[in-house]
Image (cartoon, rainbow, N blue to C red):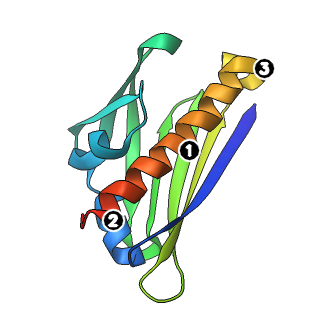
Amino acid sequence: MAEFEAERSMPAAAEQVFAVVSDMDRLPEWMPDPVDVRPTGDGEVHADVPERGVDAEGNVRVRPEQLRVEWSHAPAYAGWLQVEHADGERSTVLLHLSFLGEQPETKGGAAAEDVRRWLDDALGRLERVVAAGA
């Protein structure tokens, strides 16, 4: 098992950021390359990560009362994104991924570094979307 986390301050109120991250149709705006995630139905998504051989269905649960989005692809993968209030019209986003099986990411090295880079890329893209007035 391997756990990854990244955090970033956002230039908008928590509710505005949550409106972006909880809208499954907006996932392509802030997902990192080479991750392609798109909604396929109520609470379901399809994820493609060609360089990792991932072509999978997953579940998504949006928790507006907690400003939180959770997802999973049982039994090998899960994650969550939490939006927190900060000072003024700012907020913070914490993005967490868990690899629960024997994926390359659980062994460290280049695969784990890719995940860390993808997390940072996703939060950077989200920050740009939010700054542009999401």
Q: Is residue 113 above or below residue 52?
A: below
Residue 128 rendering spot, x and y as whole percentages: 36, 56
Residue at the location (68% across, 42% down)? 4
Residue at the location (64% across, 37% down)? 116
Residue 27 rendering spot, x and y as whole percentages: 30, 44
List the single residue furthest toward the bottom: 88
Residue indicated by mark 1:
120
Residue indicated by mark 3:
107
Residue indicated by mark 2:
131
Comparing marks 1 and 3, which lies closer to the viewer?
Answer: 1
Q: Which mark is residue 86?
A: none
Can see residue 101?
A: no
Q: Foreground residue, 97 or 35?
A: 35
- Neighbor class of circle 1 (other Cα within 10 Å; few <14, some 14-19, many 20+) is some
Comparing marks 2 and 3, which lies closer to the viewer?
Answer: 2
Hey, which quadrant is residue 67 in on the image?
bottom left
- Neighbor class of circle 3 (other Cα within 10 Å; few <14, some 14-19, many 20+) is few
Q: Amino acid at mark 2?
A: Ala
Label 2 and label 1: CA atoms lie apart by 16 Å
